[in-house]
């Protein structure tokens, strides 16, 4: 079971990977980073991607299992304690940004962010590998 640094290194080994981070979406803080940052500042990128993750996790439109059952939801937006989405994929002209939510035993407010070059990366492979990494990630 990899820790944050090992997880980020595995993410960076993916073809086309330009940068990776483990981010807490409630605070917007990067718990670990590797490679480049799209805007040159890993902390700013973490805060910006956390806004996107927070929107997906908190808005009921992204929780199709129980759209009217807001009383049973927790603070993170899901009825079972985790975020209502597995991952987010944002496509730009030159890159993909994949945000993969990590299920944890505590507050489940962590996600993996991979910045993937669109010309050399494989989106399907990267998404599957991030899901595997998220399942094995140990946060201590």
Image (cartoon, rainbow, N blue to C red):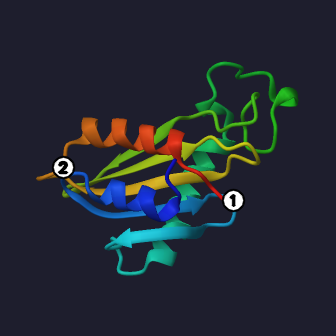
Query: Where does the image place residue 83, in percent across and percent down from the top left?
Result: 65, 38
Query: Where does the image place residue 70, in percent across and percent down from the top left?
Result: 81, 29
Q: Residue furthest left?
A: 119
Question: How many circles with numbers are drawn on the protein?
Answer: 2
Judge left or right: residue 81 versus residue 103: right
Q: Residue furthest right?
A: 71
Q: Nearer the viewer, mark 1 or mark 2?
A: 2
Report helix, strand or loop for mark 1.
loop
22 shown above or below 129: below
Q: Quadrant of residue 117?
A: bottom left
106 shown above or below 60: below
The residue tagged 1 is 26
Marks 1 & 2, CB-CB < 8 Å contact? no
Report helix, strand or loop for mark 2.
loop
The residue tagged 2 is 121
Q: Nearer the viewer, residue 51 or 3?
A: 3
Q: Residue at x 76, y 47 (%)?
A: 106
Q: Nearer the viewer, residue 55 or 43?
A: 43
Q: Quadrant of residue 81?
A: top right
Q: Residue at x 46, y 65 (%)?
A: 5
Query: Where does the image place residue 36, in percent across and percent down from the top left?
Result: 31, 73
Q: Nearer the viewer, residue 59 or 24?
A: 24
Judge left or right: residue 49 versus residue 116: right
Q: Residues within 10 Å of mark 1 (few under 14, many from 20)?
A: some
Query: Where does the image place residue 38, in percent across and percent down from the top left?
Result: 33, 71
Q: Quadrant of residue 26?
A: bottom right
Q: Residue furthest top?
A: 65
Q: CA distance from mark 1 to mark 2?
A: 29 Å
Nearer the N terminus, badge 1 or badge 2?
Answer: 1
Judge left or right: residue 140 versus residue 18: right
Q: Quadrant of the C terminus?
A: bottom right
């Amino acid at each position: 079971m990899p820790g944050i640094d090992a997880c980020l290194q595995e993410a960076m080994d993916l073809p086309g990977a330009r940068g990776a981070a483990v981010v807490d979406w409630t605070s917007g803080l990067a718990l670990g980073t590797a490679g480049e940052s799209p805007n040159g500042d890993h902390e700013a990128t973490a805060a910006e991607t956390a806004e996107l993750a927070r929107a997906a996790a908190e808005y009921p439109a992204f929780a199709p299992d129980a759209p009217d059952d807001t009383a049973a939801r927790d603070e993170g937006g899901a009825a079972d304690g985790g975020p209502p989405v597995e991952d987010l994929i944002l496509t730009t002209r030159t890159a993909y940004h994949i945000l993969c939510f990590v299920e944890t035993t505590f507050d489940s407010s962590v996600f993996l962010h991979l910045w993937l070059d669109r010309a050399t990366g494989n989106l399907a492979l990267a998404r599957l590998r991030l899901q595997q990494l998220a399942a094995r990630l140990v946060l201590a």
